Image: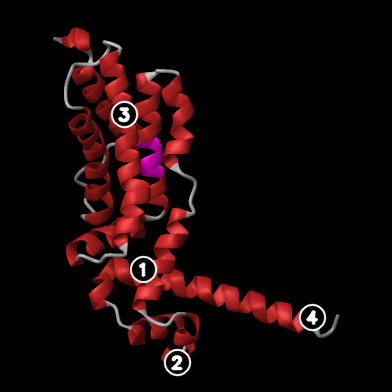
Amino acid sequence: MALTEPRETRRRAGADRREQILREAMACFAEDGFRGTTIKTLAARVGISEAALYRYFPGKDALYAAIIAHKMNAVDLVAVLAPVAERRDDRALFTSLAREIVARVEADPTLLRLLYYSALEGHELAEPFFEARVKRLREFVADYVARRIDEGDFLRLDPVLAARAFLGMVYDHLNVRLVLGRTETYPQPTEEVIETFVTIFLRGMRAQAV
């Protein structure tokens, strides 16, 4: 037992250090981009040598891949919203969708900046996250809109463009607050923003609005 405890302690310490490196790497990538972040800077930020950092990750690509893999393990938003979609309660669905997106991004704003940097830098490791999360969510919303069009409740518009329109409003709100930092320019409470966006979208989509 005496021999086991130190080994378990070292294992926990190693796991904690790995998590610390990932947190700091994500913050660095979000602040300076993938290309602007160096292993030397990251090691200094963690408080270890470059050689020690390389024992956990062989390079920046491995770090980036580990971050994306970790983020893809989060609870799937589509799975959360699917039961609401089945009820055909449009306002409940789009309100829940906006709330979930805002809450998740506000809880981890570095991910949004990291994904933007990845797109600007053309980093290929962002593609799995886009396919598994961003594209999947957009397709879920577009499929829901398409069903409501077929049922005669929504205008016969391109469902993909409709999905982009709603998600675009939500992400514009997040960009203004978290990327541009213009919280004083746009001080409206989140619930007011969400309610307004949902109302604009649904009134524009209702078939009887024609």
Residue found at x 31% / y 20%:
147
On the rendered image, what quadrant is the C terminus found in? top left
Amino acid type, mark 3 = Asp
Residue bearing the label numbered 4: 4
Q: Which of the pair 112/147 is nearer the observer? A: 147
Residue found at x 35% / y 32%:
191
Residue bearing the label numbered 1: 27
SS state under label 3: helix
The label number, if any, that marks residue 51 in the structure image = 2
Disc on the earlier residue, 4 or 1: 4
Amino acid type, mark 4 = Thr
Counting from the top left corner in percent of width and height, residue 93 is at: 39, 26
Disc on the earlier residue, 2 or 3: 2
How many neighbours does mark 4 have within 10 angstroms: few (below 14), some (14-19), or many (20 or more)?
few
Q: Calculate the distance from the C-alpha at mark 4 to the C-alpha at mark 1.
A: 35 Å
Q: Quadrant of residue 195?
A: top left
**Magenta-tinted stretch:** 98-103
Mark 1 or 2, which is nearer the eye?
A: 2
Vertical position of residue 139 compared to residue 128: above or below: above
How many neighbours does mark 2 have within 10 angstroms: few (below 14), some (14-19), or many (20 or more)?
few
Residue found at x 79% / y 80%:
4
SS state under label 1: helix
Residue bearing the label numbered 3: 143
Q: Quadrant of residue 190?
A: top left
Amino acid type, mark 2 = Ala
Q: Which of the pair 140/190 is nearer the observer? A: 140
